[in-house]
Amino acid sequence: MGAHNALSPWETFFFLIGSSGAALTGLQFVVIALVAETEARTGTQELAAFGTPNIVHFCAVLLVSAILSAPWPGLSGPATAVGICGVIGIVYAMIVVRRARRTTNYKPVLEDWIWHAALPLTAYVVLALAAVALPRNAASALFAIAGSVLLLLFIGIHNAWDTVTYLAVGMRQSETPPSGSPPGQAQGK
């Protein structure tokens, strides 16, 4: 099956997902600007572990969508490019885990480990494996790639929302402790 025949039915999907990834990358910059204007106790370690990965995930969605929207003469080219994205994503997911373990102002809870570590790692592993399968089984591989980029998009949306709500609600609660709590005691996320 030629690249055009395999990729053509996916044009609208990857255009929509790629555009969403690009738009959400811009919105994440707005979130980071708002964070910078708060008096939140966040440092570069927390930003590297919980903020920057959202940009990486959104950009991965945009990049994979662009790769699969290009007019390739065969499937080995996009398979290689998407596979490289998957492998780099796996390495990056492991770096994020290391960064999350080293944070000092915030200690991750189970939900953080799921959304910031396990799900992104899963998405990038599936992306890499689907890229390997793309030249031999394009139909199934494209569904797996689509699922991976959609998961990365939802991870980024969830994590950006989580950050905003933590800053809007959690940080205010830590500034005004509830009655019975010692002054300065921070509330959990």
Image (cartoon, rainbow, N blue to C red):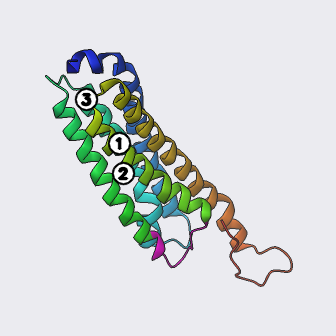
Q: Secondary structure at mark 1?
A: helix
Relative side of 36 to 112, left or right? left
Numbered disc in front, either 1 or 2:
1
Amino acid residing under circle 2: Val
Q: Are marks 1 and 3 in contact (CB under 8 Å)?
A: no
Residue shown at 72% from the left, 68% from the top: 173
Give the quadrant of residue 48: bottom left
What residue does disc 3 label? 136
Q: Residue furthest right?
A: 180
Whole-number angstrom distance, CA of label 1 to CA of label 3: 15 Å
Q: Residues within 10 Å of mark 2 (few under 14, many from 20)?
A: some
Whole-number angstrom distance, CA of label 3 to CA of label 2: 29 Å
102 part of magenta stretch: yes
What residue does disc 1 label? 127
Residue shown at 34% from the left, 31% from the top: 141
Residue shown at 36% from the left, 25% from the top: 15
Comes first in the chain, label 1 or label 2: 2
Amino acid residing under circle 3: Arg
Amino acid residing under circle 1: Leu
Relative side of 28 to 165, left or right? left
Give the quadrant of residue 40: bottom right
The prevailing secondary structure element of the residues shown in magenta is loop
Q: Please, is residue 168 above or below residue 27 in the view?
A: below
Q: Position of residue 23 (x, y in %)?
A: 42, 37
Q: Quadrant of the N terminus?
A: top left
Whole-number angstrom distance, CA of label 1 to CA of label 2: 15 Å
Q: Which mark is residue 56?
A: 2
Residue shown at 68% from the left, 76% from the top: 186
Numbered disc in front, either 1 or 3:
3
Between residue 37 and residue 171, name the one nearer to us. 171
Comes first in the chain, label 1 or label 3: 1
Magenta-highlighted residues: 100-109
